[in-house]
Amino acid sequence: MLKITDLEKIYRTEDIETVALNKLSLEVKKGEFVAIMGPSGCGKSTLLNIIGMLDDAEKGSFMFNGEEIIHFNERRRADLRKRNIGFVFQSFNLIDELTVYENVELPLLYLGVDAAERKQKVEAVLEKVQIMHRRNHFPQQLSGGQQQRCAVARAVVNTPKLILADEPTGNLDSTNGNEVMQLLTELNEAGTTVIMVTHSEHDARFAHRIIRLLDGKVVMENILG
Amino acid sequence: MFKNHLKIALRILLRNKVYSFINIAGLALGIAAFLLILEYVSLEKSVNQFHANLPTMFRLLNQNSKGESWAQVEPGWATKAQERFPEIKSYCRVAESVGQGVVKYEAKNVSFREKKVAYSESNFFTFFSFPLIKGSASALQKPDVVFVAASVAKKYFDQENPIGKTLTLYNQFGKKDYLVEGVFANMGDLSDIQLDFVFSLETLKNPANLNDNSWANLTNLDSQYIDTYFQLNQNTDYLALEGKLNVLRKELSKENDDITFRLQPFSEIHLASSFSDTYPHNGNIKYVFILSGIAFLILLIAWFNYINLSTANALKRANEVGVRKVIGATRNNLVMQFLGESILVNLLAFIGAIFLVTLLQPFFNEIIQKNLSLSTLLSSSLWIIGLGLLIIGSVASGIYTAWGLANFKLIETLKGKLHKSAKGIFLRKSLVVTQFSISIVLIIVTLIIFSQLKHMQNQDLGMNIKQLLVIKGPEIGKDSTFKNRVNAFENDIANLNFVNDYCTSGSVPSNWYNFTTVGFTSAKSKTGDEQKPYSFVTIGHKFLKTYDIPLKAGRSFTEQECDVEWNNNSKVLLNEKALEQLGFKSANEAVNAKIKWDERYLDVIGVVKDYHHKGLQTAIDPMIFYPFNSSSYLTIKLAGENMNSKVATLENVFKKHFSGNPFEFFFMSENFNKQYETESQYSTLFTMASVWAIFIACMGLFGLATFTVESRTKEIGIRKILGASVFSIVQLLSKDFLILVSIAILIACPIAYYFMHQWLQDFASRINIEWWYFVVAGVLALAIALLTVGFQATKSALMNPVKSLRTE
Ligand SMILES: Nc1ncnc2c1ncn2[C@@H]1O[C@H](COP(=O)(O)OP(=O)(O)OP(=O)(O)O)[C@@H](O)[C@H]1O
Ligand SMILES: [Mg+2]
């Protein structure tokens, strides 16, 4: 599904340069569930953002579905992104002014899906994450777990091929965290590729493979049973 | 998608009430001011435009070699010109002001002094497009006929049918009866020609009706008193015709003067075509420009508020933007969304503005002395430009905010709070500085106009006009007993215990001169001096005493000297300006000297100290006082208070001797100050504009302060925990804003100085622009800004630091 070779990302501020990714190479196959781990500041989020085409790299190659996309401009990346990738964040990132239903519906609106299909898809996914009964609530009225389930629902409503999750359980207690992990596993079993950044060894065990980073490099890979 | 945008837009407005209110109210105030002023400008633009023949209508002007021009021309030219030049399709002469007098309806014994009176050409109602309510336009072809305005018909005849009634006109042409043959609609705000009575000019063609005023003969080519309008054939080159008219004038004129003809397009009579257009105008293009400028500036301040508040608010919404982008929003999606929000806010503001306009309309009309309403906007096509401007403004400010938001770096927006870019901060600061510069300029302008006005009202006029009441002389009943009745009346007045002094005169201060004329020389005069003008005032023997005007040398007229026939008199008084212009070195030199007026010799018996016969806008003119017992004005110096009962007593005495005449009076000080009406209007207008501007600017400042305080809540909390005092925190938060206002003061002062220096040049007697105007304006602006920001700053400084830390 994606193949990254010798990727470099350097942050420059006035006084210092930070090498966030240092000639990093990585390959993820279709249908895989990959966990990325490593100490704070090692470049996990940076990597995930580049994979998610939210950010661009300095150098290297990034093949997505057999296509080199490293030179893609913002517009083409955005197009690729909205058709193929769903995001789940640690801080949920729901829009406060929209209800649960509206938040989940939004990606479909941007894709120009017609009303009847939207309704059917949104309701289906809300059922799946079990917050249908909260569909007309605003994010502030939900628990953290419910918010994250809503965020997952929003990430998958347009059936993306790839889900990127940056510490999806970081703000949740273990019960709620497990529910979210369960959801991700189900999605993966249904055929979606999942790449997840996590600090939790427990969560990482849901994945097929753990990639460990240090100072912007892959230092170890564990393949799980 | 649209529904989603509208929904979120409304939710955001409702969630952030203070911000929404400031944003919408600020815009509404700006748009309201803009609309009110647009009404006025629309009205001004549409005056006179209703005449069906407008494109081919022209007014004939006389112009002298100094470039001064006026509309009163000699009556004979119109006929001569039409005979000679076929491109003149028709002409219409209107003799205004010479017809003024008293109109009486004998049957009911009601009479009024009427000013809006004219003798008009028989084609008046076809040449111009004044609608007739009753009667036929052709009736004006007959002599001794009058058409009256609807309001006049009501005033004289109430419910009765005015047609066929007889009105009597008393004026310089004597007493004459006229048959009412028509009623026209009141001429209203949209016409410069303002008449209540249209008498048939045919009447004056009969020499018997001229009452020995041979100058008024309609074939005369040497006395200027009539307005002449031409209708030309389509596509006539009017400038070429102007040239031909001047050739005609050279050929036929008896006087060898420096006057030439000018043709003024009728459409340009109200507002000049440009600032350099020196022809006479009834409107004031400067006023229109100043007002339009103010309207635009206030709107600008409101838009700047909008931009500043929206971009500040946008920072809070960075995360939302990021999330939307991640989910699949394109830049276009986002621009459309924020543009939609901006249009919604502007729409709400527009509705608010309409409401405000309706509310403020009566006050504004009072100031501007016009009858305006929202429907006035439709009277000219200006509203299209206005609406366009509003739409462009709201879309542009919307796009600006939307663009800025849509261009945030995606990754940064996702991290939650955005750090404001240096460019954005600079822009915001510039907008605040501009807003305050405009406001401070307006404050300084207001202060200076106000001071100039006060200066003019309080300046020593060289005479004492306190307690002076002026009665206008009688017009009706000038028969053989008139002279005796005037004497008896004056005796009765003199015997009233509250009358300190009284005098008669042919004109009074603030009401112009009797006339202004040339042809005076003295032994000291040089060639060419005979072309210099002198203003005449005919006075009775007690004039100087009643007005408290001192003599510099010599003496005033005696009672006997004032009784001498006009042509037999040989004595005059001069003022100091006239003395200089005649070449005398001192007052003593002039006294007993002879001056020559055309072929007559006059003795100077005294020199009057200069006093302000007219308002302080103009310099004192050279004046000549001529002794004459005129009954035009009677000035009375009253003692004590309680004017109402005194006026009533005077009215009784007046009616006793001059029954049938309207009793008309005014207080000299009031009449004199009326000359400052324009300045007083400017003063009110600028006061309003500057209050308005600073209010909107401060709303914006308040909003920005709120955002600043919000975004620094954590910092404030930490500082407090570390021991910062409330005062130091207020200082910290207010400092930046006060620096901006200070920069604005530095920018505003020279601009205001430049404009007000120019403005003051129009006044012969003017104030100096003192440094303290700028200090007062600056301190005021700083104080208002400090109050606005300080409120927010203090509130946050007083907040419990633990609480403020937790909210982060
Ligand atoms: N916008 C930025 N400007 C400068 N340096 C940055 C920026 N974003 C990240 N970095 C730096 O890049 C490095 C990698 O950051 P990254 O956010 O990818 O770490 P991480 O592995 O996700 O850490 P954590 O587990 O704490 O989330 C860090 O050293 C960080 O300081
Ligand atoms: Mg991270």
Image: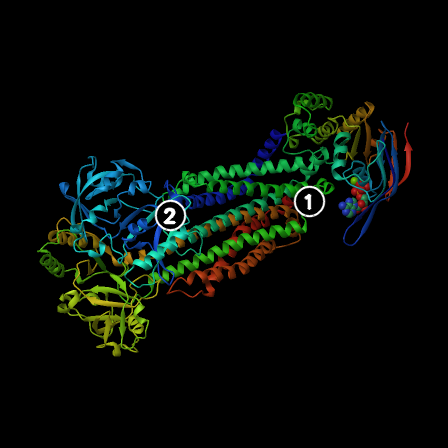
* B243 lies above or below B595: above
Along the viewing direction, whichever of B20 and B579 lies nearer the viewer: B579
Q: Amino acid at mark 1?
A: Leu
Ligand 2 quadrant?
Answer: top right
Q: Is residue B684 visible?
A: no
Residue B448 in picture, x, y percent from top left: 43, 60
- Quadrant of the snapshot with the C terminus of chain B: top right
Residue B233 in picture, x, y percent from top left: 38, 44
Q: Nearer the viewer, mark 1 or mark 2?
A: 2
The residue tagged with tag 2: helix, strand or loop? Answer: helix
- Quadrant of the snapshot with the N terminus of chain B: top right
Residue ID for mark 2: B266
Do circles 1 and 2 both sit on a common chain? yes
Along the viewing direction, whichever of B34 and B277 lies nearer the viewer: B277
- Badge 1: how crowded within 10 Å, few (<14), some, or many (20+)? some
What is the quadrant of residue B394 in the picture?
Answer: top right
Q: Is residue B671 left or right of residue B6?
A: left
Q: Is mark 1 within 8 Å of ligand 1?
A: no
Q: Is residue B710 left or right of residue A5?
A: left
* B666 lies above or below B120: below
Q: Is residue A76 left or right of residue B760?
A: right
Question: Which label belongs to residue B418?
Answer: 1
